[in-house]
Image: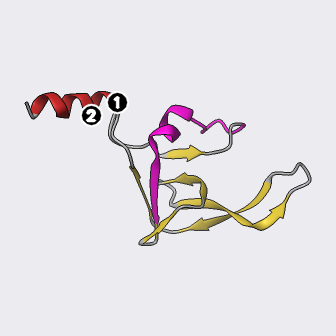
Amino acid sequence: MSDTPPDHLSTNPKSPHFDMDVLQRGIGIRFKGRERKDVEEYCVSEGWIRVAAGKTRDRHGNPLTIKLNGEVEAWFENPAEGAANEKASDGE
């Protein structure tokens, strides 16, 4: 697995951009220079994130989201399983 997170990722299992393996590694998001923990979906190339709009729900019970435009940076918070083993063997 590469050390570059996907360009477009969603936390909603119904989305075509959902990837559980990537989400389990942990994704950090910086939006307009500020680190965000409440991002539900992002796209780095198009420069937007989706966040929940308070406690508001749609008619299906899902949180209502708003799209914010700006500079987006994404990174993995945890190293890949194979990369952690490689680093340990390199240090010996």
Is residue 17 inside the magenta stretch? yes
Q: Percent from the top left, x then y, of residue 87?
A: 18, 34
- The residue positioned 68% from the left and 43% from the top of the image is 12
Q: Percent from the top left, x then y, of residue 30?
A: 44, 64
> Seen from this angle, which residue lies furthest left?
92
**C-alpha distance separating marks 2 and 1:** 5 Å
State the scheme by which the image is colored. secondary structure
- The residue positioned 56% from the left and 34% from the top of the image is 20
Asked whether, in this view, residue 88 is left or right of residue 69, the answer is left
Residue assigned mark 1: 81
Is disc 1 placed on a helix, strand or loop?
helix
- The residue positioned 18% from the left and 32% from the top of the image is 88
Q: How crowded is mark 1: few (under 14 residues within 10 Å), some or many (20 or more)?
A: few
> Seen from this angle, which residue lies furthest right?
59
Asked whether, in this view, residue 91 is left or right of residue 64, the answer is left
Q: Percent from the top left, x then y, of residue 67?
A: 65, 63
Magenta-highlighted residues: 14-30
Is residue 1 inside the magenta stretch? no
- The residue positioned 20% from the left and 29% from the top of the image is 86
Residue assigned mark 2: 84
- Pointer 2 with pointer 1, Cβ within 8 A: yes
Relative to 38, residue 19 above or below: above
Q: How crowded is mark 2: few (under 14 residues within 10 Å), some or many (20 or more)?
A: few
Q: Where is the C terminus found, in terms of image quarters?
A: top left
Asked whether, in this view, residue 23 is left or right of residue 11, the answer is left
- Give, as a three-letter code, the residue at label 1: Glu
- Give, as a three-letter code, the residue at label 2: Ala
Disc ID at residue 54: none
